[in-house]
Amino acid sequence: MFDQLPFLLILLALPLVALVGIIAGGPAKSLALIASLGSFGIALISAIVWQQQGDSSLGAFEYQVLSKPEITLALGLPDAMSVILVLLTTIVTLAAIMASRCPEGRERLWFSSILLISVGALGAFLSTDLFFFYAFHELALIPTFLMIGMLGKGDRKEAAWKITLYLAFGSIVLLAGLLWLVGASGSSSLLFSELLASPIDPAAQKGIAALLLIGFGTLVSLFPFHSWAAPAYASAPTPIAMLHAGVLKKFGLYGLFRLYPMVSEGLKPWLTLLIILLLANILWVGFVTLNQKRLDGMLANSSVMHMGYIFLAFAALIAAESTIANPLALPAATLLMFGHGISIALLFALSDQIEGKTGTLTMANLGGLGKSTPALCFLFGLAGMASIGLPGLANFAGEAAVFLSGFKNWTYTEPLGPVQIATIIAIFGVVISAIYMLRAIRQIFQGSPVSITENVADLTLKEKAPALLLSLALLAVGIYPNLLLQLFQRQTVQPSPVLVESASPATSETALLINESR
Amino acid sequence: MNLQLHHLEILVVALGIIILMAEAFFPRERKSFLGWIAIGGLLAIFGLLFVAEPATGDEISRAYASDRIAKFFKGFTLIITALVILMAIDYKKVLSRFTENPGREDGIAEYFALPLFACAGMMWMASAKDLVTAFAALELTTITFYILVAYMRRNVGSLEAGIKYLILGALSTGFLVYGIAWIYGGTGSMNLEVISTVLDEQMATETRTAILFGLALILVALAFKVGAAPMHLWIPDVYQGAPTPTTTFLSVGSKAVGFIVALRILQPFLDSELTKNNAVIILSIIAAATLLIGNLAAIAQTNLKRLLAYSSIANAGFILLAVAAWQPASENALSSPQVVAIYLATYLVMTVAAFFALQSIAQSTGTESIASLAGLGKTHPALAWTLTIIFAALAGLPLTVGFIGKFFAFGVAVKAGLWLPVIVAFIGVTAGFYYYFKVIRTMFWNPSANGPEIYLSPITKAVVYPSAALIIILGVYAQPLLDLVGA
């Protein structure tokens, strides 16, 4: 019965209805909570049904809003990447709403912004039409900018203005790339399925690929377009930081993987440059992270740093030239996006608790907090370990898969290619992560308590709930990565151990076309 | 006798004369009701637009087009005129402060009647396919605007704006007449249809050069009308000094008909293979220069009205981009005239909403500076979010009509391969984000200044809030716009 419903439309409409309710004066937190709980439920059920039926038109919805060119409000779950990112969005939204410490009297603004960002992110991941894919992401950016500027902390105005300008720049470059892409494909429809079926002249692909890399790259904080991210996350209100770092930033990566088949030829000339940039993300920003004195600044930088790993998977995909040649890259990247999204959201939520309880996030001023708050200490430790990439937690599965994808198709008789060298260097990033994260845990939670960390109340059940939800997701996927990976296995013929053929039907068809034409 | 399209212009003029007479012969303190009559009359004529038949008869149909685009622009003109008069009713306190008898509404209905004459001129321009009728209609509009700009006679700013507009307007009229003379000399005709056939014939190179010289002169005059570089210099000063309803009228109405005349005059030149390249090069340069000047100069503005003036120049640049691209209609793409019409329709919604809000805010705070909006997000959240929608639309954010217009303009320009202007346009959009978001930033991030309370009049509320809703609705579902231009 469930698959008869246009449930993706409901999934998108639920937060919107709650938003209207809040604007109309309803109880803000309850409405937001109910809507996000409902979205989470629908996303979870749809993931299960999708896995069982393997039907990419499940719950799809289409309504044409423009005839020349054909723009369609089209929602769908074309492949496992969409399913997983939608799931991530709803989990983080739920946690962000539960974890909110909303300033007095600003409930309506606070919760309606969270819901609006959530609608934008969900819409972007659900849209199977290029226009709405882009538009929904822009929709989510507006409340992000405004909230950082209005209710942020520290240098909020400067940080907010910086993220506004950087992301506006990125969006416009991206828009230029997308318009060029549509023009070059000659497709009259902006549906992904139609676009992916219209090949682009390789000569034009190179320019399009450059614009897409800069545009999407800015949105994902790819070096050197990353400097907006750290100040913005450090000063953003916690739920906004959770949602942007955890979910919204993944839009750029999602877009790159989604549009990859159209510009696979054009991306190849940029491979070396991309590898240098992603290594700068891992190492340069990694060292910057080491040097942070405040916990929020450290978390913000670590989030930028970890994007480098996901770009590594993308580089592996570019080098392999198709999702069939490197079937590991896409699942690896998606798994890491999920793991990173959950763990960074959890870390931001907990750092907010630390600030609320002690009044500071300067790590040198803290110490011994673990004595009075064992639960907080345990949860933070768990999230920190996840962020480092400890086995048993979701990030490990993702990072391991990324490193494996780097060496996919490589045999020990060959010399090392650029992707393999990058992978070897990138592994040392894990050491950097371990240094700053363990040092932070030691400085904050261990040692002898100081005046501000003595007699601090531990997390109440209400405060624990969002952290437990996120931790559960980290553990579940970490211990049994197949929960997510089996989504990628759907529709495959040959029984394969863990990671197999990944792309959506449309994607693999195009990839085949490209291979055949070669 | 059947009601024909050109009878509507006569009706509008008649309406204007009636209002003017009523103003003279009914010495009443309260004159708003005359404004309401004018609006009612305009809306009735707008209704007649749907039943009117094409103009028939040899004489009239030679100089008067009754095509879809003409009808579209006639409707456009009627609506913007009605909105301007509505704004004038809201603005009458300021208007009456600077006339002969300050504080009294004596003579205020002149300000309701004059836009009607301009409206008739603009409606005629939408149909003019003869250089002489185009010129006559253009002058009817421009002369009316001289008065409308300088209407607040006791206000130095308004007078200064009037003088500037008069001098540059007269200059551009000179260019126009001179250009028409050159084209007449080269082609032997004033009729654009005849010119179109003449251009495709073999002719001496000198003759073609003469005709192109005439076209260049006409383009200078039209650049004045639409506010394009290099004739954009008057825009900031005149827009800032003129009464806000006049500014709105100039910014939307005058610009729109400037473009319809430009499209009609340029069509023969852009359709003919022999002159197309020259025309496209000139137009591309004008478009790029306009985009660059409008957008970059807007960055530094601190006065909201002046910011909107530069934004109006920038928007002219985007429209010129579509004109320069000159694409015929095809199966899955719009023609350039259709894109221009759609862009102007979206521009009308956004600009009218912005100016309505501006004049009401300026009336309550006494200043037009952006800083006066500080803290609006906290004190008037509904108004602040509405303005956010309007400015986001002007910046061209997706899911607003502003995106739709720019999307189509870029679409035709990319299709025509005008890479340089397209790159400049993208720089313009980036700059646009910067200065429009500066306004949004002021509203939400800055603490409120302890100035006078901001208050929106009921009329403004009745326009601004539905406009904001329309901006979103048409931004998501833009098909009605396409249907409107027959695509």
Image (cartoon, coloured by chain):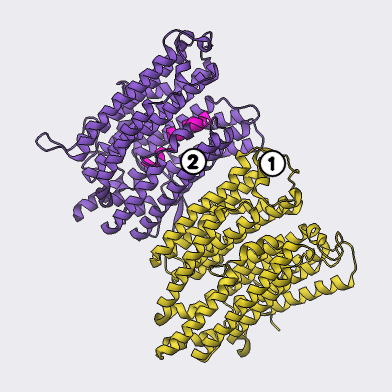
Q: Where B157 sits versus A371, above or below?
A: below
As drawn, the residue found furthest toward the left would be A413
| Residue drawn 84% across the image and 64% down it | B31
| Residue drawn 42% across the image and 59% down it | B423
* Residue of label 2: A162
* Residue of label 1: B380
Name the magenta segment's main secondary structure.
helix
Magenta span contains residue B210? no
Q: Residue A258 at what x, y percent from top left? A: 34, 45
Judging from the image, what is the letter of the chain drawn in yellow?
A: B
Judging from the image, what is the letter of the chain drawn in purple?
A: A
Q: Residue A350 at what x, y percent from top left? A: 47, 21
Q: Nearer the viewer, mark 2 or mark 1?
A: 2
Instruction: Point out the stretch of residues depicted in magenta.
Output: A234-253
Which residue type carries mark 1? Answer: His
Q: How many marks?
A: 2
Q: Nearer the viewer, residue A360 or A189?
A: A360
Magenta span contains residue A243? yes
Judging from the image, what secondary structure is the residue with disc 1 in? Answer: loop
Q: Residue A382 at what x, y percent from top left? A: 39, 18
Q: Are marks 2 and 1 on the same chain?
A: no
Judging from the image, what secondary structure is the residue with disc 2 in? Answer: helix
Q: Is residue A330 at least partly visible in the picture?
A: no
Instruction: Tell me the number on the disc at residue A367.
Output: none
Q: Where B396 sits versus B275, above or below?
A: above
Q: Where B141 sits versus A245, above or below?
A: below
Left or right: A492, with B103 as reference point: left
